[in-house]
Each structure stands twice: as structure tokens, then as C-alpha cells.
Image (cartoon, rainbow, N blue to C red):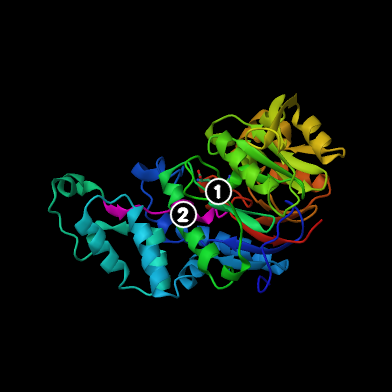
Amino acid sequence: MLENKSLHITSEIGKLKSVLLHRPGKELENLTPDLLERLLFDDIPYLKIAQEEHDEFAKTLRDNGVEVLYLAELAAESLYDEKIKLNFVNQFIDEANIESEGLKEALGEYLYTFSNKEMVDKMMAGIRKDEVPKYKRTSLSDMIDDSYPFICDPLPNLYFTRDPAAAIGNGVTLNHMRTQTRNRETIFTKYIFEHHPKFKDMNIPFWYNRNETTSLEGGDELILNEKTLAIGISQRTDARSIEKVSKKLFNSNTNFERVLAFHIPKKRAFMHLDTVFTMVDYDKFTVHPGIEGPLTVYEITKDEKSENGLKVNKENGTLEQILTKYLNRKITLIRCGGGDPINAAREQWNDGSNTLAIAPGEVVVYSRNYITNELLDKYGIKLHIVPSCELSRGRGGPRCMSMPLIREDI
Ligand SMILES: NC(=[NH2+])NCCC[C@H](N)C(=O)O
């Protein structure tokens, strides 16, 4: 499906044709209570069930005509050339936070003993000190660090493929993530979009790059229509990054002419814009009641006369007023948990307002958010319900677990 085409995303809801997923792997089994907070997890999922749930998610997509591509496979297939592979391995090691040169070398040698796919899986899973044969504790710091089991930490958030990169129009934002643990994920995405045979001849424009210094995460990037993008100024995304993306987009061959920057609270329950609202139909959104406002939204448009090429217009209003104005139609907000304070808080925590639209009015949702799901059904939204006992422990839902590559225009 991707063959001979370009990336194409001009909405949140157009019929989904092709998507990038990551099947959770050993990285989840390398989580321990001590690591959870730093690695942005709240609990340790049971891998076997998490994989079964994820397979069900992928099957739901395939059964509905979506091409499913997997991150680890694409990453391995991107290393067909020795030079590309060497650069990739070096970059991975450079960013793994290893001080000692000897250790870096030992790790490099160890990685080269595997096939490309096994090597990528290892990099994702995390590598323990005791599995690297030439690892010797000679420096003071290595001796002192001894109780820490890993040379490179696991990357448990990889199954949230939405965040490290996001397709917008025919390009991608290759993101600079807020935290080191997630920034390491973007190395895989970089090599895929730059080198994988499916992508390398597409000349994909990068609207953002991982070597930027301010952060931007895909969960904050919502494509309201072919002209309008919403981006959260959030716990994960800086206002400065939004200016940079806006400038790139306004000077591109896409139709984007407006970015709405939503200022949302910097707290974990609101971590990204897509944890508090997602689009389910032309005129319907599911929302966390806490985001209904009044809100402050900054409308960014192109202005050749201004110093940085942008004009910013500050707006106050409720979410409904703002969406009605910019989408130019009457909007219905469907409240997570029906708006009941307890049900809303619980279901939103389990990503009840994080739906993945596979067509207008048709979404993938987690089974556990049954109150929100009943409500969506009442509003005429077609639901594809996927199991969610283990996947939800990573604090991300169907939208977070998918990076759409091609959607039909609406
Ligand atoms: N687009 C999203 N809402 N992604 C959710 C990511 C969850 C992940 N544990 C993190 O904290 O980064």
C-alpha cells in the first residue's frame, strides 16, 4: 500500500490505510519498580497478555483494510548497508548514556554478534551488564555503579508509536522528546524514514528534527483538517517547538495555514493533548471534562511582515466555542465517563478519550472504558473494542499506540 506513494495525512479521521505499530517486547519485562517513574510507566504489564492484546489491536486494523507495519522490522530492514548500520549502532551507543570508552566498544562488539532484527530487538529490550562478555569493571564509576543492572535501559514506551514521530501532510515531525528515555526511541524512527527502502525515495520533508533543543511529542499533534493543526503546549511540548513547526509548514507545499496552540495543564493525567481530546467524526470529539474550558488558545498564522514570519492571536473561550469557530460547524463534545467526576477521572486515566479513528465516525477504543464507550455508541459512533487490561498500564490508548502513515482525504 505504501509502495510508490508518499505519506499522506490531512485529517484525524479520514479512512486509515497504513499505520506503524510496535508489538511490545522484552522491554516490558525489563521494567522493575525502581525504574517505573523514570521510564514513565505506572505498573509492570504482563507481557504475554500485553502482546495478545496488541495482536488483537493489529488484527482489528487489518480486518478493516489497514496495512500494519511494525517498527522493529522496518528498523532492521533499514540497516541493509554496512555504513548505515555502523552509524546507527554508534548513534545508539552514543545516546545510551555510557561513560566508559571500553564499555562502549564491548557493547558495539556484542551488538554485532546478532542478526539485524535480533540486534534491534535487543536495543529495544535493554541490555544487561552481565550479558556483555567483555564487560569488565575496571573504572571507579563502573565499580560504584555496579548494582545497576543495565548498560542500556529498556525502551518500554516504544509501543506508543504516536509520539516519537508524527506524519503531517506528506512529511513528518521527527520529534525531540522531553525525556531521555523517549528521545532514544526516535533513533529508530529517524533511520526508518531516512533509509528504509519503502521511504527513502519519498524524499519525506521533516517539519521538525530530533536534534532540536526544545521538545515536541506526537501525542500533542492533532490534525483537525487539511488547513488546521492543533498542538498542545503541555508537559511534553514547548511553545517554541510549535513556532518552529508552524514556520516550516506554512512555507511548505501543504495546505496548512493555521496552528492552534492549546495551553493545557502540565500534569500527568493531561500529559498530551490527545489524552484529553480526540476527534471521532467530522463534528464530534471525545473529551476529558477538565479540558472544556474556558481555555486559552493561540492561533498562529503566516505573516511575512513580522520578524519571525508568524502572527499570533490569543483567544479565550470554551473548547466548544473554539472548535466551532475554526472548524466552521456545530461541534458536539462527548464527555469521557459521561462527565460524572469519578467515572470521568477513572476512564480518562485509562485513556477513555484517546480513541483512534479509522474512518469518520468509526473508532478503536479500549474495552475497560465501558461508560464512555456506551455514550459514543449512543452518539452513533461505530466502535471497534479491543482488550486493554495490560496495554493500558503504560498510560496510552489506541491513538497513542499508532502512527498513521496514510489516510484518505475527507
Ligand atoms: N500520545 C500519548 N498520549 N502517549 C502516551 C504515552 C505514555 C507514555 N508512558 C509516556 O509517558 O510517554
Rendered-image quadrant of the C terminus = bottom right
For label 2, count other residues whose C-alpha is less than 10 Å away and answer few (under 14), some (14-19) or many (20+): many
Res. 197 in view? yes
Residue 249 at x, y percent in the picture = 67, 48
Q: In percent of the image, x 51 and y 47: which residue is there?
A: 393
Task: Give the farthest residue toward the right.
Answer: 329
For label 1, count other residues whose C-alpha is less than 10 Å away and answer few (under 14), some (14-19) or many (20+): many
In front here: 309 or 94? 309
Q: Report the disc number at residue 213.
A: none
Mark 2: secondary structure: loop
| Residue 314 found in image quarter | top right
Residue 176 vs residue 17: left or right? left
Res. 122 in view? no
Residue 272 at x, y percent in the picture = 59, 40
Against 104, residue 295 (above or below) is above
Rendered-image quadrant of the N terminus = bottom right
In front here: 63 or 214? 214
Mark 1 or 2: in front is 2
Task: Give the farthest residue toward the front.
Answer: 305
Query: Magenta stretch?
Result: 149-163
Residue 58 at x, y percent in the picture = 62, 64
What residue type is disc 2 on? Glu
Q: CA distance from mark 1 to mark 2?
A: 20 Å
Q: Is residue 158 magenta?
A: yes
Which residue corresponds to mark 1?
A: 392
In front here: 25 or 21? 21
What residue type is disc 1 on? Ser
Q: In percent of the image, x 43 and y 71: which residue is there?
A: 117
Which residue corresponds to mark 2?
A: 185
Q: Earlier in the sequence, mark 1 or mark 2?
A: 2
